[in-house]
Amino acid sequence: MSYHFGRGWSKLTPYLLLLPGLLFYFLIALGPSIATAFYSFTDATGIRNAPVHWIGFDNYREFLFMGRASLDNLEALKRTLIFSAAVTIIQFALGLFVALIVNQNLKGANIFRTIYFMPVILGVVIQGLMWSLFLYPLGGPAAKLLSLLGLRSEFLGGPPAQAFAWVIFIQIWANMGITMMIFLAGLQTIPAELYEAARIDGANAWQLFANVTWPLLTPSVNTNLLLNIIGSLQAWQLFLVLVGYRNGTQVLGYLIYATGFGQTSGSVTSSFRQGYAAAASIVLFLLVLVIGMTVQYVLQRREERILG
Amino acid sequence: MSKKMFSFLSLLVAFATLLAACASPSTPTAAPAGGESAPAQPAGKVTLRVLVHQNPPMVAFMEEFNKKFQEKHPNIVVDMSVVNANDLSTVSQTRLSANDIDVLDIFGFSNAAQPYMKQVDPPNWQQLIEAGLLMDLTGQDFLKYYDQSALQDAGSYNGKVYAVNLGRVSYSGIYYNKKLFEQYNLKVPTTWPELVTACETFKAAGIPCMTAGGKDGWPIFVGAYGLIGSIYPDQAALVEGLWTGKIKWNDEKSLEMWRKMQVYARDMMEEGASGIAGDAAPGRFASGAVAMFPGGTWYAPAIEAAQPDFDWGYIPFPGSDNPEDNKYLFGKYDQGWAIAANTPHREAALLYLAEFSEPANYQAFVNAVGFIPTQPTAQLNTKIGAEVAPYLANFRVGYEQYWVAPKGAGQFANPWASYFKPFGTDDDPKALADKVQADLQAGLDAVNK
């Protein structure tokens, strides 16, 4: 293979071209991540000029082992896993199902694709505001529907498990469009001849899906699973917008935000604890890393097995 | 480790250190010394960045004040940002750190560590002062207009003034609809049994008893702070008792509080209150749809603005069976002004505060927001002023201003009515009391180890 950038100093051209992007990546992604790891061993407050002291593993010890607050943190960790599992499974299945439907040669399929994708383009605040209005318990549309059945609910302001379930639902509503689009792109790469040949061999609809569509969708399946898992493990904005800091609803991502910016477990008003929040972030990062790497390993093996 | 890998890791660590160095301190910037008098006019054209929290009557007043200020000082443009009260401390911290603010709204200093508290972090206002981010206002001429006690209690640290507090508010009272009370021949409640009877009467007539802006979370439990106060009138002693173990959230006296809180959350608060936004609740009460509204005095202007002819009154929360225990109002020092120590517009910022502090302007502010004034010459001549006047001698700083949770305390370590259904999951006062005490005790045990 010939080298396109010449000889001598010219060889450096590709590296020079890569340099701005690399620096940008360092500046906005890798650098702050490393700084977060550093701060997790300090008592940093996030306030400029405030002294920063090295305190070793104290933040980790407090987060994981100190009093009932650490049990609350572990509860948030558990809730994060439940949230991630529920969102991933439902969003994945629903996205696939909708993609299969809108991939049919139906009249108005493009309109449906647009409608299903539309929530993705709305910001989290808009999504939250829309659903807060829809779920307004004093005469909002959902309350009126329930009242027709003689029922009522506080919706997002009700018991924490109920509020949590609503956030799962809204997270899926907000992001299902991306899952659908990735599946749709995958479906459109499957050659029509394969379906024709399978039909000639007498395959029914289920056999077509199981033996043609599903295996050939493997790259889309992998992409969607990874995106859904990582995205849902890190989710926190919808919790902030929809339910705020409420006992029994926090996931780890939101707990980190609340801790870093002045709301801590059991306290009415408190101080800024960004070192402690950084330690919690590292715990979340490790969780995402372990789950993400494991899932990626399993999916890669599966892809190699199916597609060779 | 290969040479390449070592070089790469070295680069990463160097970069991280560089970032850390950017954020960590060299030498704290010293706040300008006090001992000054009237502020001077800024020399050139200035844009003064002001931060306030969302409180509709206050924001409306500030917009009007800013307009007049700009007319008087054409070389100063006021750029005012408004944030939700829940976000004020976060936004203050980030904008102060970024040198992106000149004048900021700051709540009265509270939650300072007491000698009996162990391993507690300093409150955020103290962190900001110690980092040299708030200007020392000591000696400024306009301070003379304010109560020395207010300056001392709500804006001073280590003998220096860092914030000018603009007023006290009560958060432990209840607004009531006078017409509805007359219509149903009900006496304005002065005891808990009378309050229960009034609510039962309204509910039987199909009128919800109470409302609150539950969507913001805190209005539900803050609405019951008067109930805590009627049972523990000395709230500083309550906090000390909780820290030292002399008072427990599950002792007999506290159980009475929890039982009443359950009635408040389950039976008195209207269904759907959890969906009402904090700044929508006064309007709902003013519409006459509900009989009562437990809330702070700062809501009064919003009630008046929503329905100017609406006839309402304001009473201390009658949480005790004994009317003598129900004569206290609990509250806090509310909004104040501080100036960023590193502001490039020092003269303009001082001028802004000086102008605001002029007695006529301050009086207009108090009239607009309903604060109990911190300028001794100001009159409490608003409707809410007349309502709270009989109780002012019994005004006390409340639990929320004293409480600091021990590290390791669980998330239920507070006396919050919102733990009860339908806002929370609990429906057994004894079980909840045990849970709250256990969450608090876990923190006390952890810091006493």
Image (tube, rainbow, N blue to C red):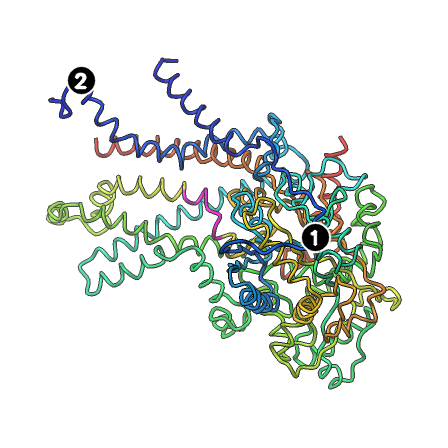
Give the extent of the magenta segment.
Answer: A231-238
Instruction: Specify the subunit that label 2 lies on.
Output: A
Q: At numbered mark 2, what does the secondary structure look like: helix, strand or loop?
A: helix
Q: At numbered mark 1, what does the secondary structure look like: helix, strand or loop?
A: loop
**Displayed quadrant of residue A74:** top right
Work out whether B12 lies above or below B350.
above
Classed neighbour count for the residue bearing mark 1: other residues with Cα under 10 Å, few (<14), some (14–19), many (≥20): few
Classed neighbour count for the residue bearing mark 2: other residues with Cα under 10 Å, few (<14), some (14–19), many (≥20): few
Discs 1, 2 touching: Cβ within 8 Å? no
Secondary structure mostly seen in the magenta stretch:
helix
Question: What's the residue at 47%, 53% (across, down)?
Answer: A238
The front one of B443 and A25 is A25
Q: Which residue is mark 2?
A: A8
Work out whether A101 lies above or below B61.
above
State which quarter of the image contains the C terminus of chain A.
top left
Res B419 seen here = yes
Work out whether A7 lies above or below B146.
above
Is the residue at mark 1 from the same chain as the one at mark 2?
A: no
Which disc is residue B331 wearing? none
Instruction: Specify the subunit that label 1 lies on.
Output: B
Question: What's the residue at 22%, 61% (across, down)?
Answer: A109
Question: What's the residue at 32%, 49% (across, down)?
Answer: A179
Work out whether A178 lies above or below A21.
below
In the image, what residue type sits under mark 2? Answer: Gly
